[in-house]
Image (tube, rainbow, N blue to C red):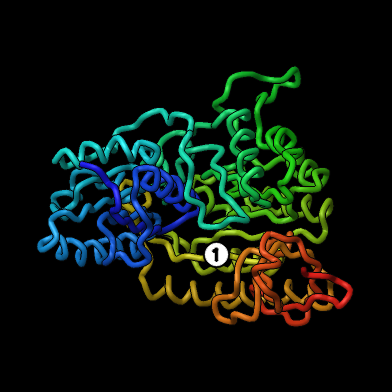
Amino acid sequence: MTAVSRRYHITTFGCQMNKADSERMAGILETMGFEWAEQPDNADLILYNTCTIRDNAEQKVYSYLGKQAARKQTQPDLTLIVAGCVAQQEGEQLLRRVPELDLVMGPQHANRLQDLLEDVFSGNQVVATEPLHIMEDITKPRRDSTVTAWVNVIYGCNERCTYCVVPNVRGVEQSRTPEAIRAEIEVLAQQGFKEITLLGQNIDAYGRDLPGSTPEGRHQHTLTDLLYYIHDVPGIERIRFATSHPRYFTDRLIRACAELPKVCEHFHIPFQSGSNEILKAMARGYTQEKYRRIIDTIRQVMPDASISADAIVGFPGETEEQFEQTLQLIDDLSFDLVNTAAYSPRPNTPAALWQNQLSEAVKSDRLQRINRLGSTKAMERSERYRDRTEEILVEAQNTKDPTQVMGRTRSNRLTFFAGDIATTKGKLIDVKITDVRAFSLTGEVPASVTLA
């Protein structure tokens, strides 16, 4: 069965890794002859790339599936796929729950989508969740942007945080070779991309599984070495990376970020809790004191760097005093952004089985309190941009105001200003900031700057 003139739609839930996987799978589908459909109801193939970090994301997938499964009753040629972490977690159980599904595939199989669909189009119902070594990615992603791009550098996770299902669904750490990463970035540069974001579940664990060591006794390949190796790719103006783990974040990495002009002054380093007792229960492998030292070092070397983080409230057994230690850490360190979530028990994780679960009311109360503090500190951090001139990489039109374009500062603040996307997209433009909000900025282009 051929896929000529058929249409596809992908809905992506969750993290940047999932977004990057979706781009690769979209690229595969388009090489097979599929065309993008803006609305799922107009598609002949629907793929849900799923996230299992939070229960509400998982339940949303089942809600979407219910509608499309009903549609398949009258349109039997509709192809339904569940990919990503829910697929890896549930496996064949998904088929029992939603028998209309054609393909269930874990994250490690994203590059095999075409082979798996050949089996589906031959009349088979396919489950692909077995662990495998991820072969080098030679697919051409369908990038959602023509300015910025994700580049996976390490797959999987070797951590065993007691709340997290990721190691069970994304497999063990597998680092790509520096040569393969640089080759992908060179192609992106040739295609006109200006900014890349290196991705990994724990990006600073990059290279631990690659062979070789230095005379000093460290791994031959690290994220620091990778940044030096790719930095001079012509055409790439900005380099970012995410997500960092405090366990592996080194002074050497901080110095490299300060020395390399293309590396943006923005760090995403989750702390999860400000309580050492809770961090130990989470099996995070660091203390709040170590985390504070990392942030202090960054700000000594790069005083204006922006720092974002993740935090979980309501972890099993968390006392009011321990929660207040998290609030104190946020108050002391003044993050530019804190992504927050109430603890959600996940299947096959140790913490889900503990008896000291907190009530939803307590979790909701703590989530509201941490969000209020996070927004206050973010607003305080935004004030430093007022009346400053910032370099903005223009990415797209402002969908809410077509007279404006939007882009980001080097420190990752979303910024809007008046402009024509046809003449500004992909350009680095100096913008004077005139209005600040907690999580975004507005500015104007000085008269001395030519946009044409």
- Residue at the location (70% across, 67% down)? 423
- Residue at the location (55% across, 76% down)? 399
The reply to whether residue 441 is in sight is no
The image position of residue 251, as x and y in percent, is 76, 41
- Residue at the location (49% across, 73% down)? 366
Q: Residues within 10 Å of mark 1 (few under 14, many from 20)?
A: some
307 vs 39, nearest the viewer: 39
Q: Is residue 306 above or below residue 150?
A: below
The image position of residue 398, as x and y in percent, is 59, 75
Residue found at the far front of this picture: 5
293 vs 184, nearest the viewer: 184
77 vs 107, nearest the viewer: 77
Dot 1 corresponds to which residue? 339
14 vs 431, nearest the viewer: 431
Quarter of the picture holding the C terminus: bottom right
Q: In which quarter of the image is residue 326?
A: bottom right
The image position of residue 439, as x and y in percent, is 64, 73
Q: In this view, does 314 lie above or below 181?
A: below
Is 429 left, or right, of 226 in this rendering? right
Dot 1 amino acid type: Asn
- Callout 1: helix, strand or loop? strand
Q: In which quarter of the image is residue 436?
A: bottom right
- Residue at the location (13% across, 50% down)? 96
Q: In this view, does 400 lie above or below 196?
A: below
The reply to whether residue 150 is in sight is yes
Is 227 left, or right, of 258 in this rendering? left
Quarter of the picture holding the N terminus: top left
Is 351 left, or right, of 41 in this rendering? right
The image position of residue 254, as x and y in percent, is 76, 45
Is 131 left, or right, of 233 in this rendering? left
